[in-house]
Amino acid sequence: MPPRALKPVGVALVDKPAGPSSFALVAALRRRTLARTGHAGTLYPFATGLLLLLSGAATRLAPCFVGLDKRYLTEVDLTSTTTTGDPEGEVVEEHEPPADVELDGALATLRGEVRLPIPAASAVKIGGERAYKLARRGAAVEMPVRTSMVHALDLVERSADGAAATLALHVSSGTYVRAVAQALGGHCTSLRRTAIGPFDVAEAHPVESVQLQPVAQVLERLDADALARVPVSIRAGVLERA
């Protein structure tokens, strides 16, 4: 049975490395604090970057953070698609990379409000079962479409042969960057979350050395809409325990 202590209370800004799951980092912080520990949105094992982990009574504040906009850097292989939209999947199709003008046009269609299929290797439930479990069994599933807001989608760099492109994205919560890569006819070969709302990965540390930030200071950085996702009474109760 994992520890359920409500103290220490705080928020940890963790810089996730590639490899371990987000839940492994939650468990690692829990072992250090011996407190109830949660997260405000996960990253897939191949991805890196900012994770917000909540300790003790701060786990009750998760809704304040889950809906925040996200920023990412991703490198996309424009010559192939995979079953997962990332390097962990099997190659589905190979093709020549698009010309510069074609890529620019495709990027333009993916800015603003967009509707994209959720990747098959996701935690969304289909008929009561996680989509990624169905995908692992090879089940053919028609994935639902999700509407997202892509505030910014910029081409940072393109390889000399045109096969790879580095993209910077500012997107609404719940946007799948892998779906953007698939819409470009490619797949993500790397993915790094650089910001969640006002919190930047430059502030983050490895889970082994990260320190908890005081809840009061963290909440001061959120806007009114984010704070409103948790009732005032619950926020006050968390602050009393801090």
Image (cartoon, grey):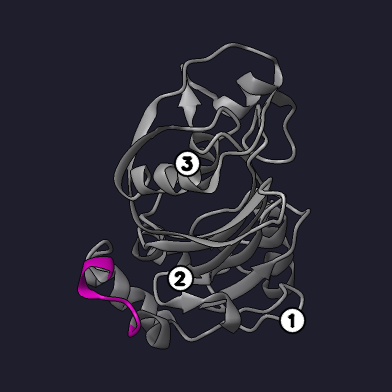
User: Mark 1 or mark 3: which is in front?
Assistant: 3
CA distance separating discs 1 and 2: 19 Å
Identify which amino acid the numbered label 1 is placed on: Ser
Any magenta on residue 224? yes
Start-end of magenta stretch: 220-226
Where residue 242 sits: x, y (%)? 45, 83
User: Mark 1 or mark 2: which is in front?
Assistant: 1
Report which residue position mark 1 lands on. 209
Report which residue position mark 2 lands on. 58
Where residue 10 sits: x, y (%)? 51, 78
Report which residue position mark 3 lands on. 102
Identify which amino acid the numbered label 3 is placed on: Glu
Q: Are marks 3 and 2 in contact (CB under 8 Å)?
A: no
Q: Quadrant of residue 157?
A: bottom right
Residue nearest the viewer, comparing 169 with 145: 169
Identify which residue is drawn at 53% across, 84% down.
213
Q: Quadrant of residue 211?
A: bottom right
